[in-house]
Each structure stands twice: as structure tokens, then as C-alpha cells.
Image (cartoon, rainbow, N blue to C red):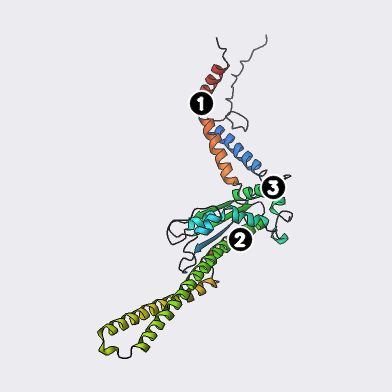
Amino acid sequence: MTEVLPRAPLTVEAPRRRWRLLGPLPPVLSAFRLALGAALLAIGLSFLIPNRYKAVGEFYLDTRQSGGLGDLASLASAVGLTAPMGGSVSPYLVSELATSDTVLAAIVRTALPAQVFTRNHPVRTLEEHYEIDDELPDKRFWRTVRQLRERVATDVGNRSGLVSISVWDRDPGLAAWLAEAELDRVQHYLGVARASRARAERAFVEGRERALRDSLRAAEGRLAEFLSQNRMTMEAPLLQMREGQLRRQVDITTALYSSVQQDLERARADEVRDTPVMTITATPYPPIKKSWPARTLLAGIAFVLVFGLHLTRDHWLPALRGLRSSLDAPRE
């Protein structure tokens, strides 16, 4: 008879809890995994977006010069702007001048130097660079102006009055050239406004100087004629009174003539003045870093968005399903 030995009790080992990459995870870690994947996907897709490079130039207006920037109403009306009331030019007017059709059209008409391109193939015009295709030349030209306006931004400091002009482009060298062209054209038109005003003021003062010179000669002639005809004025009170009137007229006309002569010299100096209307504080240079796309920002937005949606899916997912079922339900 065989002896049956007792079997040892079977011990079942409890399964170990392992954190597998594709296994079930706690809600926070699962949301973190999805958010991290979304951030990496956003970074990868951002490489499909062409890079943008922004060049910035800054300047402030020199308002200490007399007669040069006193009134830009003629320039403002020529470029379709509204001049501010008062005797000084506003930085906001100059900011609008930078994006006006007059300035932008002059830049579009300018041929592009081949050496300004650092990344793209050199082209001769902005129309070719922006790849604007239209049969009508005028329509193609103004489409180029409109697209350039969309790439130009201006800003004015509230306290300092510093005006900044920024231009972005896919080529950093061309962006710097466009920003520098903006500064040159703005300074050119401000100089034209100052020269035209000084020229008009000089012509006006010259007319006044000629009129006063003739008046002074006539007054001196009347006094000389009176003295030649009346040598003994000390014995006649009426003759003394008449002589005093003539001398006062000569003195007043002489003072006015001297003042107008000073104004004329000042107007002539302002007309030939070649000092800059604005002082450039920051010269545009080809940017090294791109301004867009901001891959860190896009990755952060994607991470936060996906992380928050995944954690709150128990709240918005039933509502979304209920809304979908109500929309799909047949109407009686």
C-alpha cells in the first residue's frame, strides 16, 4: 500500500504593479503623457511653418529746430493723414506716415540689392519676392503695397515719445533693409515738409521785406522833402508837430524793417538747413534669431490645453455626448 504524501499548499504570488508605457496609468500621469505627446507634435509641426525674422529701427523727433516741423498739414494731406492741431508734430503722425501709401509705394518701386538677401534667392523687386501674380501691373503693384503694410508695425512710447518701426520677412537681411528703407523714406518726407515750409516762409518774408523797404524809402523821402522846404521849424509849433510825426513814422518803419530783415535771414538759414529732422537711436540690423514661430510657446500651449482637457474629460465629455445624441435624435 503506497503512502500518499500531503501536498504542499500552492502559494499564488500577487502580481506586481508595474508602470508600463502602454498600460493603465493614474489620471494625472495619463494626462501628462498625452500632453507631452501633444507638445512634441506641436514642435514637430512648427518646423513646417516658415521662419519669420523681424528687424526694428527706433528714432525720436528733434522738435528743437525752428520752422522745420511747425506745421505738417500739407504733408499729412498729401499722404492721406490728418495733421494734429497745434505747432508741434506728433510722433503718432510720423507713425502713421510710416505705413502710408506714399512711403510704402516708394519702397516697392525701389530695386532690391542682391547683397541684402542672406537666406533666400535674390530677386529684383518685392513683387517677385512676395510671389504676387496678377495680369494687371497696377493691381499687382498695390497688392504688393498692401502685403508690405501687413508686415510693418509701428509703436510710440507714451512717455519718451520714441518711435519704433519693425518689419518682418522670411529673409533676415531683407527685413533689415526694409526697416532701414522705412527710416530713410520717413526722414526724407519730413525733410521735404520742413524745406517746403521754410521755402514758403522765406518767400513770404521776402515780400514783407520789399514792402517795408519801399515804405521806409517813402517815409524818409517825405521827411527829407519836409526838412528841405521848412528850415526854420523851431519857430512854428505846427511845423514841429508835423516834423515829429514824420520822424516817428520813419523810426517805426525802420524798426519793423530791421525785425523783418532778421526774420528773412532766419528763414534763409532754415531753407538750407541740412540737419536731420529725426535722430535714429537704433539702426536696423539682420536679426539672428527668428521671431516666429515660437516653438516653446506653441509647445506650452499644446501641453496645457491637452493636459487640462484630459483631466476634465469626465465633466465635458458626457455633456458633449448628450449634445450629439440630441442632435442625432429624429425629430417628430
Chain-order first, disc 2 or disc 3 = 3
Q: Nearer the viewer, residue 129 or 219?
A: 219
| Callout 1 crowding tier (Cα within 10 Å): few <14, some 14–19, many ≥20 | few
Alpha carbons under labels 2 and 3: distance apart: 24 Å
Residue 31 is situated, as x and y percent measured from the top left of the image, at 55, 33
Chain-order first, disc 1 or disc 3 = 3
Residue 72 is situated, as x and y percent measured from the top left of the image, at 50, 60
Q: Which residue is mark 1?
A: 316
Q: Residue at x 71, y 61 (%)?
A: 115
Q: Residue at x 57, y 53 (%)?
A: 100
Q: Residue furthest front?
A: 229
Q: Nearer the viewer, residue 159 or 223?
A: 223
* Quadrant, the N terminus: top right
Q: Which residue is mark 2?
A: 180
* Quadrant, the C terminus: top right
Q: Which residue is mark 3?
A: 140
Alpha carbons under labels 1 and 2: distance apart: 52 Å
Q: Between tags 1 and 2, which lies in front?
A: 2
Query: Residue 214 appears in which quarter of the rendering?
Result: bottom left
Question: Do the residues bearing badges 1 and 3 touch, measured as CB atoms within 8 Å?
Answer: no
Q: Is residue 294 left or right of residue 233?
A: right
Q: Nearer the viewer, residue 292 or 228?
A: 228
